[in-house]
């Protein structure tokens, strides 16, 4: 943790005179005016003029135990609030520690603001051995985020905040980094009060009307329409359901789009686009409507869509129109605005209800065949958790072979995962951030032992924040996915069979409550009790307990 102080100057030990209206205040006041009331990070020697203003502005600090956890916590918080997550790092190593989280936000199109101090103006590339000295922090971050700026005044920094919100509101949300030189951060702000006010929202961008009319005609005439909804479909809200109901169109989502249509809706096929039955459905549609998805390789699991019918794509960026699959009609605009345009252009229709029961059965069978043990664990979890539970996941087999398919979600951003960046260590801090933002909702983080060890220190963050949080550690003995990859290549298991701590005792040592599950029959009751309990609960669940468990009944 980068909190050490430099030695005091020999000629003076007097504390610096505080400047309450400095650049740090101007930046944070602007964020507060946009509605941000929580930040994630670690106080350090160089960022204290950010931290000075948190309490006076009513901003709650969440101190994680690693800056990577701060970034993932901010991501979980952002998904619940609709606001960008904000991370304050110190200079140098603090910023670099957060860049994996920035990479996640970039790949998954999540809004994130990283604020960091930088060397004073005039000391760039000085190589003089100053504390946290880094060759070029702005460029390092710039290689990862949407943009990285080193500002030269409080006004410039505040304008950068406004520019970030322009992206978050009207473009593809992605992370940004703002570096404030120490001499600027600590000096009197030159930003006028009116510059600190949040910009009013503009109307959402609509698509070209002629293109909408052409797309509406195709959809109205379609016999086998299918909707593929990605993360960019989430702003459409209820409009997605209305369009699906009008067309009687099945809706399959990507993992980032999970819950865009409630997964108990009769037309929902869940987030199983990676399964062959869902891909065959999309390929066989006479009109495939893709909403807010690049149809990325990581979502397809080696499969590739090859639609035989017409393809209509809706996206906020024109550059997505032919990414991975070509479109016949591209509708560029906000998904909510464009789907409302389509609804109006199609008008009323009388269509017979489609029966998806056979397809749902096939998808469930394909998902269960990937791992009967992990699907059983996920189904048992679903049977005892409240319907509004936020489920945290990680780049763990229990997530992509279990909870993704077998825990239905009724609302978006209730499944915390990173299918594209696929990093370990995301699930626990993201779940903490989600619980901070939505304390009224149950949050259960279900992940593998390898992933949990990546961020195990954040258990103390949950305890310190007095959160009611459940962590289910599904133990497959280390890095089981890589063990399987090695076997596929004829490589003996190397570096993947890991020594395990006593997880229940470790949870207790952190100030939580540990549960060692030794019988498969005990798992569901223990999880129900933990969800109803207070504080941090950690359940250690060995996969081997479920090797011969009977399959769960279909929901």
Image (cartoon, grey):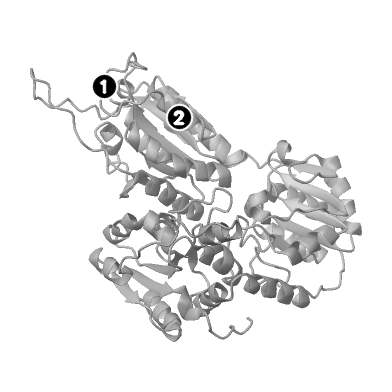
Q: Residue 476's spot in the image, x, y percent?
A: 46, 68
Question: Could you say which quadrant of the image residue 318 lies in?
Answer: top right
Q: Residue 532's spot in the image, x, y percent?
A: 38, 77
Quick check: 519 above or below 27? below
Q: Secondary structure at mark 2?
A: helix
| Mark positioned earlier in the residue sequence (1 or 2) | 1
Residue visible at 85% across and 61% down in the picture? 284
- Which residue lies under the disc numbered 1? 129
Residue 460 can be seen, yes or no: yes
Tell me if 71 is positioned left or right of 25 in this view.
right
Quick check: 75 above or below 528? above
Between the residue at mark 1 and the residue at mark 2, the CA separation in whole angstroms equals: 19 Å
Residue 111 can be seen, yes or no: no
Q: Dot 1, how many residues are within 10 Å of its Cα: few (below 14), some (14-19), or many (20+)?
A: few
Residue visible at 42% across and 56% down in the picture? 437
Q: Residue 266's spot in the image, x, y percent?
A: 72, 73
Q: Residue 239's spot in the image, x, y percent?
A: 70, 57
Q: How many marks?
A: 2
- Which residue lies under the disc numbered 2? 140
Residue visible at 70% across and 68% down in the picture? 268
The foreground one among 535 and 199 is: 535
Q: Quadrant of the C terminus?
A: bottom right
Question: Could you say which quadrant of the image residue 364 lies in?
Answer: bottom right
Q: Dot 2, how many residues are within 10 Å of its Cα: few (below 14), some (14-19), or many (20+)?
A: some
Q: Secondary structure at mark 1?
A: loop
The label number, if any, that marks residue 244 in the structure image: none
Tell me if 399 is positioned left or right of 328 in this view.
left
The foreground one among 484 and 553 is: 484
Tell me if 59 is positioned left or right of 209 in this view.
left
The foreground one among 208 and 193 is: 208
């Amino acid at each position: 943790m980068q909190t050490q102080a430099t030695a005091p100057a020999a000629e003076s030990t007097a504390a610096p005179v505080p400047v309450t209206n400095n650049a740090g205040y101007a930046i944070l006041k602007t964020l507060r005016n946009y509605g941000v009331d929580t930040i994630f990070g670690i106080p350090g020697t160089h960022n204290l003029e950010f931290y000075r203003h948190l309490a006076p502005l009513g901003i709650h600090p969440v101190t994680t135990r690693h800056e990577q956890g701060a970034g993932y916590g901010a991501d979980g918080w952002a998904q619940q609030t609709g606001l960008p997550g904000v991370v304050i790092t110190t200079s140098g190593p603090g910023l670099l520690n957060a860049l994996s989280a920035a990479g996640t936000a970039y790949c998954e199109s999540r809004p994130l603001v990283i604020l960091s101090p930088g060397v004073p103006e005039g000391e760039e590339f000085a190589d003089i051995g100053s504390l946290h000295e880094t060759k070029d922090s702005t460029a390092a971050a710039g290689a990862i985020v949407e943009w990285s700026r080193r500002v030269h005044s409080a006004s410039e920094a505040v304008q950068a905040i406004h520019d970030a919100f322009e992206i978050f509101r009207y473009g593809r949300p992605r992370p940004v980094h703002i570096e404030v030189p120490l001499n600027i951060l600590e000096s009197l702000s030159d930003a006028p009060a009116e510059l600190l006010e949040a910009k009013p929202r503009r109307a959402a961008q609509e698509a070209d009307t002629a293109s909408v009319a052409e797309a509406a005609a195709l959809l109205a005439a379609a016999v086998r329409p299918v909707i593929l909804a990605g993360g960019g479909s989430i702003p459409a809200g209820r409009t997605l359901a209305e369009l699906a109901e009008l067309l009687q169109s099945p809706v399959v989502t990507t993992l980032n789009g999970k819950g865009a249509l409630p997964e108990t809706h009769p037309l929902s096929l869940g987030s199983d686009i990676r399964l062959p039955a869902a891909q065959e459905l999309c390929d066989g549609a006479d009109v495939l409507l893709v909403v807010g998805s690049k149809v990325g390789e990581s979502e397809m699991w080696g499969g590739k869509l090859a639609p035989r019918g017409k393809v209509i794509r809706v996206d906020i960026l024109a550059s997505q129109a032919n990414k991975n699959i070509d479109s016949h009609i591209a509708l560029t605009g906000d998904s909510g605005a464009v789907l409302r345009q389509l609804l109006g252009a199609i008008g009323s229709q009388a269509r017979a209800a489609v029966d998806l029961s056979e397809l749902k059965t096939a998808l469930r069978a394909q998902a269960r065949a990937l791992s009967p043990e992990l699907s059983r664990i996920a189904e048992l979890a679903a049977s005892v958790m409240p319907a509004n539970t936020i489920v945290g996941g990680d780049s763990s087999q229990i997530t992509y072979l279990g909870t993704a398919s077998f825990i239905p979600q009724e609302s978006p951003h209730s499944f915390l995962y990173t299918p594209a960046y696929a990093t370990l260590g995301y699930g626990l801090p993201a779940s903490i951030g989600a619980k901070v933002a939505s304390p009224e909702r149950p949050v259960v983080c279900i992940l593998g032992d390898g992933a949990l060890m990546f961020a195990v220190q954040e258990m103390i963050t949950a305890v310190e924040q007095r959160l009611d949080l459940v962590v289910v550690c599904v133990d497959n003995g280390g890095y089981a996915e890589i063990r399987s990859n090695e076997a596929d290549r004829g490589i003996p298991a190397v570096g993947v069979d890991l020594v395990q701590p006593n997880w229940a005792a470790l949870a207790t040592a952190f100030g939580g409550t540990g549960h060692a599950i030794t019988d498969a029959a005990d798992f569901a009751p223990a999880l129900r009790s933990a969800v109803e309990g207070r504080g941090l609960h950690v359940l250690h669940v060995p996969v081997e307990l479920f090797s011969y468990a009977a399959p769960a009944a279909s929901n």
